[in-house]
Each structure stands twice: as structure tokens, then as C-alpha cells.
Image: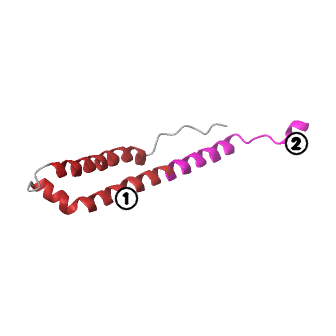
Amino acid sequence: MKPSQTKPSILFRLVIPATVVFILTILALIASLFGDPRAPVSQWLEAHGDALLIWEFVIVLAAGLLAMIVDRWRTLHGIEEAHVVSPQTTDSDHAN
């Protein structure tokens, strides 16, 4: 039996922008290596880039894991509801 279709949770929609920000930060760090090291953005990234990448990675990882956990819970909950609404017949029902 196919489980009922549900809308994706908001967490799946948050993973994409968080990942985009993470990738843009990596690209900015790479670009700062080739730019002027005295530029304010370059200095800020040099001072805070590592912590920024760690926090962004943790956010992407947490949002992804939570999205998968919520999706699994909703799927199992949908299957349980489907069994309550239309219980499967047993072999004794077919014997009569």
C-alpha cells in the first residue's frame, strides 16, 4: 500500500537556502585569497571565516537530519492512519 501523499516539511525548504549560503561562503573565501588582503571583507573573512563555515555546516546538517526525521515520522504516521481507516483482511475472513 502506498502511503498518503503529504507536503514536504518546511525543513526541506530551509536546507536549500542554507546550502546556498554555505557554498557562497566557500566561494567568498576562495575569492578573498586572490583579492586584496587589506580589503575589509577579506580581513573579516580571514578572522571569522572558519567559525562561519562551521556554523553554516552545522545548520545544513541539522536541518537536513531534522527534515529526514520529520519526513519519516510523517510517513509512518500516514501508514498507521491508513491501516486504521482500512484494516487489512485476515486469512480467516477469506475462509468463509
Observer-nearest residue: 56 or 89? 56
Observer-nearest residue: 71 or 44? 44
Please, is residue 2 above or below residue 73 in the view?
Answer: above
What residue does disc 2 label? 92
What residue does disc 1 label? 58
Going by the image, does 32 lie left or right of 22? left
- Circle 1: is it few (<14), some (14-19), or many (20+) Cα within 10 Å? few
What element does badge 1 sit on?
helix
Three-letter residue code for mark 2: Ser
Q: Quadrant of residue 50?
A: bottom left
Rendered residue at 28%/48% (across/down): 21
Q: Which residues are magenta?
A: 69-96
Question: Which numbered disc, 1 or 2, marks the residue closer to the eye?
Answer: 1
Residue 67 in the magenta stretch? The answer is no
Image quarter where the N terminus lies is top right
Going by the image, does 21 lie left or right of 40? right
Q: Position of residue 39 (x, y in %)?
A: 9, 54
Observer-nearest residue: 91 or 64? 64
Q: Main secondary structure of the magenta part?
A: helix
Q: Quadrant of residue 41?
A: bottom left
Q: Position of residue 61 (x, y in %)?
A: 41, 55
Mark nearer the N terminus (1 vs 2): 1
Image quarter where the C terminus lies is top right
Q: Residue furthest right?
A: 96
Residue 78 in the magenta stretch? The answer is yes
Observer-nearest residue: 88 or 46? 46
What color scheme is it? Answer: secondary structure
